[in-house]
Image: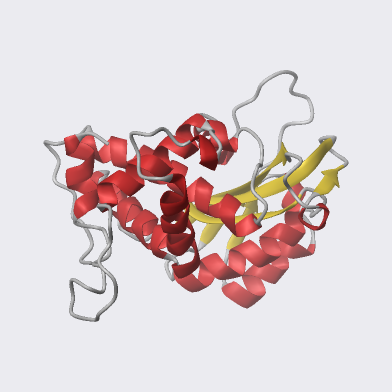
Amino acid sequence: MSDAEWAVVRDLLPVPGWLSGRGGRPEGYCHRQMIDAVRYLVDNGIKWRAMPADFPPWPRVYAFFARWRDTGLVTELHDRLREAVRAVEGRSTEPSAGVVDSQSVKADATVTLGSRGFDAGKKVNGRKRHLLTDTLGLLLAVLVTPASVTDRDGARSLLPTAAGRFRRLARVWADGGYTGHLTDWTNQHFGLVLDIVRRGEDVRGFQPLPRRWVVERSFAWFLRSRRLVRDYERRTDTSEAVIRWSMIALMNRRLAAQPHQRAVLPAG
């Protein structure tokens, strides 16, 4: 991270227990070193054991990554950065509309048989990333499943979680893969309007569809992180954490590039 990026992240980090008088063992490495190491791994797609010597030892970095994954700290940092980006853009910190879609990616040999599947439509053997973004393309919720899980089944798990976290969320745009009983189910149980945006039947070639291009751009952002070109993780929650780290780096750079605009950072 540059100094400007670190200045953005520093105030959003959780305070270690030993600093707040709750006991515990003092950390041997500063958070800036650890975050730099995790971001390097996500951006360059290296193995954990191939961590460069400039960073702390890879077992310590992995322990940091796993602790933040299991305790939800990476989600907390990600959400605070998203609120800051939305504030800079003049939006409310909580979205009222979103876009949902999925992406099937090939899985590496390290992915177990129980957490992978075959997407017959896209001919992909691996996993599927179900994504819900706001209208800026920022991540609201992510769910990683076997690629054999349909878009509708993935949305039945993704949308209730998002509706519980974002009370203002009222409308979600989706493609034709989400048609059927799902539209009535989301409206009846969660008050969400699932707006299906269809491609014109008489149109040939590329056609930019309203709102749907936003989530497609988010998938393109993720693929700039080489760790996400395919799925290498043994656990699905690890894949979800890597996706959040990729978005953290993107939002961090965006905030650092706008020093003249002061983001209203959430109190932490």
- Judged left or right of residue 266, residue 203 is right
How many numbered dots are placed on residues in this image? 0
Coordinates of residue 38 in the picture (x, y in percent) = 42, 44
The answer to whether residue 155 is visible is yes
Image-quadrant location for residue 5: top left
Q: State the quadrant of the C terminus.
A: bottom left
Image-quadrant location for residue 75: bottom left
Q: What residue is rendered at 45% in x and 58% in y?
A: 63
Coloration of the structure image: secondary structure
Q: State the quadrant of the N terminus.
A: top left
- Judged left or right of residue 89, residue 45 is right
Q: Is residue 191 above or below residue 62?
A: below
Coordinates of residue 235 in the picture (x, y in percent) = 65, 56
Q: What residue is rendered at 51% in x and 73% in y?
A: 164
Q: What residue is rendered at 65% in x and 75% in y?
A: 188
Q: Residue furthest right?
A: 120
The answer to whether residue 133 is visible is no
Q: Residue furthest top?
A: 205
Q: Which of the pair 195/151 is nearer the observer?
A: 151
Q: Which of the pair 220/191 is nearer the observer?
A: 220
Q: Is residue 260 above or below residue 17?
A: above
- Judged left or right of residue 42, residue 237 is right
Image-quadrant location for residue 64: bottom left
Q: Residue furthest left?
A: 260
- Judged left or right of residue 42, residue 7 is left
Q: Which of the pair 18/103 is nearer the observer?
A: 18
Q: What residue is rendered at 76% in x and 41% in y?
A: 109
Q: Which of the pair 168/203 is nearer the observer?
A: 168
